[in-house]
Structures are given as structure tokens and as C-alpha cells.
Amino acid sequence: MSATVAAVLKKIAIYILGDEKKRGKLFVLIGSIAAGFLGLMCLPVAVLSSMGSMEIEQPEINAEMFSDSSLFESLDSEQQAKITEIQNSGQEIEDAMRGAGVRSQTIKAQLIYMSYFDDVQNFNAQSYANLFAVAPNDSDLIAAINSTYGLEIDYDEFMRTYTWVMNSTINEYMFTDRTTKNCSDLAVWAENAYVSGWGFKQGAIGNRDDVDRIRYADNAGLMLGFLNYDPTEKVFSSDYNTLVFTEQGSLDTMPEVAGIGLFDGSQHGIYVGDGEVIYCSESVGYVTKDLVSNGGWVSWCTYEGVDYPQEVLDLIDGTEVDSENDSGENSAEN
């Protein structure tokens, strides 16, 4: 299922839950998660929790319903029309977000619209997308949306839902180049893991735990997940089992390039710009963000398998390798 459809599942669920006759079909849709219908993993916790108070007899799960077309055809004409309307709105927002240069925030924009814009009249997708382009952070974004459209979106409530949704998927809109493993995309990969609330688990690389149903990584696994993830097929490979890195110099020689690695002698972080680093911390228990100056980072490094811009390559060519490490190359086991 496309990200557009996944992002609107909350609204579809609320629509169906409003009609007692439709609840059984929604239960079938949710049941299909176990059979690998990945798009439905984005159904927010709030919707699933609301089902706990309903007396619903679990129906037989028909495996033939696990395709997009079969599920759509199983709905009545009213439901089909409603979902088509929602899909069209989602596509309009996706196009506008691309035009505004904020494609990576597409899922966020779709989720806000589908969750809160029922009573908004004369909606213009491009004007809506422009709010995302100028807002410096999510708090200011929600405030701007509330002011512009006369809404009362609770920031904390929305962010809880958004974090759950993002943890359920890998944001397909964030990659600048799906054909390469470049440091710019490594930075947004780290940002996505932070926003999505990935937890720490030894040996994990960003894959979703079958029991907890959330994503985990360990310290090296945050980078290994990026190297192993295929954004086209949306699967993790096992091509990289060991994180191979090269210390390039002290922090005072580090270029201002998002996606550069940081090293403190035992753990790694990804520099994401504005003096901030993201890393998966065993002591904290999840992917976290902090100021570089607050940590014990001692050197910057590059990773085997990641492409770097010419600015970084030129600096490396002029950097002397630490005499204690003849090759400058190290490895970190996942």
C-alpha cells in the first residue's frame, strides 16, 4: 500500500468506526496486519485503543482480501467513494509538498490534513505546503496551521500519533537519491530514526520487532541499517554486517557537512547540522539527539559504503592519518 493510503488510515478508520455495520470490515483490515499487509501498520494507537471498548466478534480472515484491490472491492460503494476522495486529497498534498521543496514531510502533512481538516473550506494544497516550508520546527508548524485554518490541534497529542505512525514505516519521501548511499541521506535517515522514536536493541539495524511492533537499532546498527536498506524494495538486506569506518581527524577539522560520522572512542553518531548529533544510545535506550558540544566526541569519520561530496574528499586527501592506525580504518561490530 502506498504511503499516501497509509497516512490516511486514521481517517478511514474513524469513518468506518462511526457506522456499526462497517466495524466488522475494519476489524478484517486490522487483522490483515498479521498476514503482512504492511500499510495498515500505520494505524495509530488511538484508533486501535478505541476498539477495545467495542464488542466485536472476530471474523474469519480471508487471505484473498490481503491485496489492495481485493480490500477495496470488498467495501460498499459509499466507502469506495470516500476512500477514493481521501486518496485523491493525499496525492494532491504529495504533489504540493514536492513543489514546496519539503517532500520529506509529506506523511506529516497528509496525516494532519486527514485527521483535522474535515470542516476546512476552500482548501488549497500549495498554500498548505508552504506552511511546512517556512516553519522552523513542528511546534511552530502546528501553531501556524491552527492560526491559518482556525483549528485547535494539540501539539503533544499529534506528535504522539505522528511518532507512532513514523515508527511503523520507513519514510519513503526522505531520500534525495535512492540509487546511492550518500551522506546527505544518511543524515536524514538518522533524523527519521530520531523522529520515529527507534529504540535500542543489540544487533538491530532499524527492522521492526515482531513482538513489540516498533523499530530498534544498536549504535552501529543505525548506520548499518542505512547501508542495508533498499528504499525501492523497502526491505533490509544483510550486505553489511560490520560497520567499517575511518577516523579522519579531530572535531576542529570536521567539515560542516550533514552525514559525517562522529566517534568518541567507543560509539558513533551522525552529524546532522546546526551543531547537533544523532546516535542510538544503549544507556538512554533509544535514538537520541544532542549538541555535539555536550558529548565526548573526539573525532570525525567516514564510513565504507557511503558516498561523500567533493568537499569532504578534498579534505581527506589533505589529512594525515593518525600514526597509531596505519590504515586509518576501523570496524564496529553490529
Image (spheres, grey):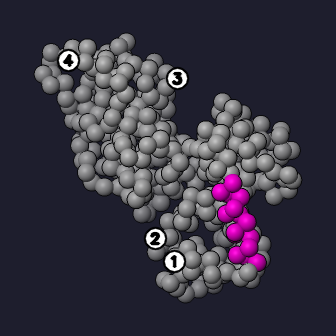
CA gap, disc 1 to disc 3?
44 Å
Who comes first in sequence, dot 4 or dot 2? 2
The part of the image, by quadrant, that contains residue 321 is top left
From this view, report whether residue 333 is shown above or below residue 256. below
Q: Circle 3 is placed at which residue position?
A: 274
Tag 2 and tag 1, C-beta contact below 8 Å: yes
Secondary element type, mark 3: loop
Would residue 74 appear left or right of 255 to someone viewing this image? right
Say which amino acid is labelled 3.
Answer: Asp
Q: Circle 1 is placed at which residue position?
A: 66
Residue 224 x/y as whole percent: 32, 44
Q: Which mark is residue 282?
A: none
* Residue drawn at 74 percent across, 73 percent down: 81
CA gap, disc 2 to disc 1?
8 Å
CA gap, disc 4 to disc 2?
48 Å
Q: Would you call the spot at circle 3 few (<14 residues within 10 Å), some (14-19), or many (20 or more)?
A: few
CA gap, disc 1 to disc 4?
55 Å
> Does the image show residue 193?
no
Who comes first in sequence, dot 2 or dot 1? 2
CA gap, disc 3 to disc 2?
39 Å
> Does the image show residue 178?
yes
From this view, report whether residue 241 is shown above or below residue 88. above
SS majority, magenta: helix
* Residue drawn at 69 percent across, 62 percent down: 88
